[in-house]
Image: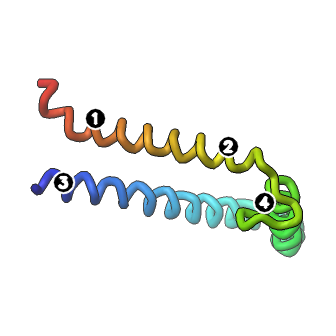
Amino acid sequence: MSEDVIALNGMTAETVIIVLECVCSIMTGVAVSLLICWQQTTVALLLSPLVTTATYLQLKLKYGRKEGGKYENKVVDDYEKANALLFDVILNYRTVITFGQKNID
């Protein structure tokens, strides 16, 4: 029973660690760029919402909406199925490795 809890904590901690790593990387990058050239960093920070919005719109036009809108694309469904299968395979592989280590010795 305790091994199940440890495995669950490990799976949820991985997600939190990835998010924390991304946030720390962004903050470190902004801090270093402010030290190197604060003018360029200010311009980049002011333009980042524009870049983010443009990227979002481009992805919407390219892949369409899930509900089935004007730009619906059938290929997305195939990719979603493949990604779901790949996610299940990786998750099951991790589970087998996690519980199988004690049986290998």
Residue 58, located in which quarter of the rendered image?
A: bottom right
Residue 102, located in which quarter of the rendered image?
A: top left
State the residue in front, 57 or 52: 57
State the residue in front, 37 or 103: 103
Write down the residue under mark 4.
36
Q: CA distance from mark 2 to mark 4?
A: 45 Å
Mark 1 or mark 4, which is nearer the start of the sequence? 4
Mark 4 or mark 2, which is nearer the start of the sequence? 4
Residue type highlighted by circle 2: Asp
Assign a secondary structure to mark 1: helix
Q: Residues within 10 Å of mark 4 (few under 14, many from 20)?
A: few
Q: Looking at the picture, does residue 60 appear above or below residue 99? A: below
Q: Of the numbered discs in the image, which one, if any, rests on residue 4?
A: 3
Q: CA distance from mark 4 to mark 1?
A: 45 Å
Residue 44 visible in the current orientation: no
Q: Are marks 3 and 2 in contact (CB under 8 Å)?
A: no
Residue type highlighted by circle 1: Ile
Residue name at image x 63 percent, y 66 percent:
27
Q: Are marks 1 and 3 in contact (CB under 8 Å)?
A: no
Q: Quadrant of the N terminus?
A: bottom left
